Image (cartoon, rainbow, N blue to C red):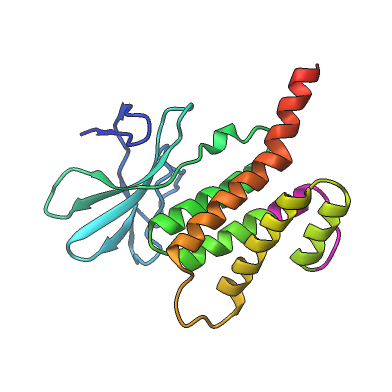
């Protein structure tokens, strides 16, 4: 069977497999993960036994790499796209380390799966990884962001955006919120992180290319 990527439309065949825990395993091309709750046999997705199963997929096209959620019924139906996960195209983040891209993609996946607190936390994690990559000084993230501002890496409005993401990430991680972070707030956090990544990595890389 095959599916069409909901981002670029390319037809492709996802590799959906199970394995015994004793078997060696390499990450599948579609980025599908094991279900950590299984005991003897690891299924590639998250299941709602005994009816439905899900697996996270990533487009095989190197120019797309869009992320989506696949689902199927255990009765034997083919896999199909269940949720189109917001995709900013992290391959366009020229100059950004894979750790930063990974954190942003995980924030997208978490939001699409309805885990807004986890998404906000991963948005914050993206900032932590930016700070580490840029050698920011300070024990806490608030100090690291201030150091990046003083170094001119985070400019005025971009620094404010990063600090807003940090604040919401802290709430999701450390505060006993009565309700999860609002989905609309998390969507804005994703947009802010996207803009921070572009300002810190993409714009300087583009300028450098034009000047050479």
Is residue 135 a member of the stretch shown in magenta?
Answer: yes
Q: Which residue is at the front of the view, 70 or 194? A: 194
Task: Name above or below for residue 211 compared with residue 77.
Answer: above
Q: Residue at x 50, y 62 (%)?
A: 185
> At which x and y percent is residue 171?
59, 74
Quadrant into which the C terminus falls: top right
How many numbered badges does the structure rendering display?
0
Q: Would residue 61 be seen by someone viewing this image from the given angle?
A: yes
Q: Position of residue 131 (x, y in %)?
A: 76, 53
Q: Is residue 61 above or below residue 144?
A: above
- Image quarter hosting the N terminus: top left
Q: Along the horizontal axis of the image, is 73 left or right of 126?
A: left
Q: Quadrant of residue 51?
A: bottom left
**Farthest residue toward the top?**
212
Q: Residue at x 45, y 58 (%)?
A: 110
Residue 136 visible (yes or no): no
**212 relative to 5 in the view: left or right:** right
The residue closer to the viewer here, 170 or 68, is 170
Residue drawn at x 61%, y 51% as measured from the top left: 193
What span is colored magenta in the figure?
128-139
């Amino acid at each position: 069977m095959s599916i069409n990527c909901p981002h670029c439309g390319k037809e492709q065949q996802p590799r959906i497999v199970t394995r015994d825990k004793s078997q060696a395993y390499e990450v599948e091309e579609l980025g599908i993960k094991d279900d950590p709750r299984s005991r003897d046999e690891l299924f590639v997705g998250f299941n709602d036994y005994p009816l439905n199963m899900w697996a996270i997929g990533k487009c095989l096209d190197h120019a797309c790499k869009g992320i989506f959620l696949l689902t199927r019924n255990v009765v034997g139906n083919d896999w199909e796209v269940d949720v189109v996960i917001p995709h900013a195209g992290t391959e366009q983040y020229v100059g950004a380390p894979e750790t930063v891209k990974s954190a942003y993609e995980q924030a997208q996946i978490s939001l699409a799966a309805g885990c807004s607190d986890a998404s906000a936390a991963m948005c914050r994690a993206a900032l932590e990884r930016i700070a580490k990559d840029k050698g920011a000084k300070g024990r806490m993230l608030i100090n690291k962001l201030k150091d990046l501002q003083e170094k001119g890496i985070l400019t005025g409005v971009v620094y404010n955006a990063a600090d807003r993401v940090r604040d919401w990430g802290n709430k999701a991680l450390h505060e006993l919120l009565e309700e999860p972070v609002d989905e609309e707030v998390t969507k804005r956090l994703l947009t802010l992180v996207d803009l921070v990544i572009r300002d810190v990595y993409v714009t300087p890389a583009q300028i450098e290319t034009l000047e050479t």
